[in-house]
Image (cartoon, rainbow, N blue to C red):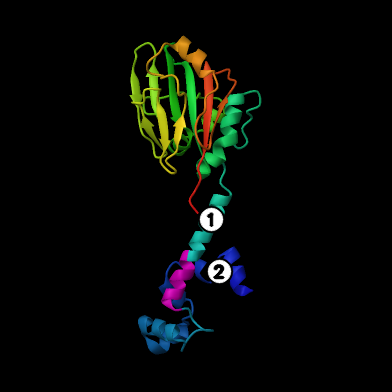
Amino acid sequence: MEEETQNNNGDATVTEFTTYEDYLDSQITPLDLYYLEDKELARQLVELGYRGSGEPLKREEFESRKKASETFRLSKRLATKVFASQGKDVRGYPFLAALAEREEANRTGKLTSIVFIRTLNGKGQEISGYIDYAHRLKTENFESIFARTRVLVPRPSDLSFYNWETQTCTSNATPNFQVIADNENGILFKNKRDRKIINVDPRVSVFAIFATVYFKLCSQEANPGDNTTRVQIPTKEHIQVVIYDHLTRRKA
């Protein structure tokens, strides 16, 4: 029962001491030092069980318990982690609500979502791109996005980016996806964990057609691939938003 309590609450025996030497020193009395006149000798006697109270912990056991206690502390912190969308009022904003709904799953790796956004930049130029949502969550503070003081837009550093006016085109691999840009039917993404292909639109390439034609074809239903679903999100902030949710099947 005592061991179970320690596992559930951390080990108070070791958490109050920074080092093993501090633990040994806690069992040395001023009288011990008076007669022994040597602190190292007094520590050795405690470690051997000749001084102090009860059976002393060996160094290896102390270090093991210390590590377990630290792991427990970190797990408690993670368990109470506050997500960027927590406490944010996203009612009336379907796109933000969709991102909030997917935040935890993308942060924990249960889901990898690709967000397609077609919008206007600050210069009034039409841009579009595919965003690795899980990667952006890890590299960017989303609190301001969920608080509606900043808008999520595609960047040249995302999975893919296209500026329709300047015809600037970029594509980049991320920790979750590999870009297959030379496919004749359009751009594809390969999930790096399960190697499944996410087909964002099998009949049209974002880099090869005009925006009006793209909008028409992208609105048609298309099979996005195994373990992947495609959802078009109503939006006030952008011209068009589509989210591709890929559920990774882990090997047993």
Tell whether 124 sits left or right of 227: left
Seen from the viewer's position, the closer of residues 70 and 197 is 197
> Looking at the rendering, which quadrant does residue 19 occupy?
bottom left
**Label 1's element?**
helix
Residue at (50, 44) in percent of width and height: 109
Residue 173 appears anywhere in the view = yes
Quadrant of the rendering where the N terminus is positioned: bottom right
Residue 59 magenta = yes
Residue 29 magenta = no
Residue at (66, 26) in percent of width and height: 91
Q: Which residue is mark 2?
A: 12
Seen from the viewer's position, the closer of residues 248 and 82 is 248
Relative image position of residue 218 (x, y in whole percent): 50, 18
- What residue span does the magenta drawing correspond to? 58-67
Q: Residues within 10 Å of mark 2 (few under 14, many from 20)?
A: few
Residue 85 appears anywhere in the view = no
Kind of residue at disc 1? Ser
Could you give the CA–CA distance between mark 1 and mark 2, rounded to whole angstroms?
A: 17 Å
Kind of residue at disc 2? Ala
Residue at (34, 24) in percent of width and height: 170
In the image, residue 180 above or below residue 169: below
Residue 249 marker: none
Magenta stretch prevailing secondary structure: helix
- Which mark is first along the chain, 2 or 1? 2
**Label 2's element?**
helix
Relative image position of residue 86 (x, y in whole percent): 60, 37
Residue 75 marker: 1
In the image, residue 238 above or below residue 49: above
User: Mark 1 touching mark 2, by CB under 8 A?
Assistant: no
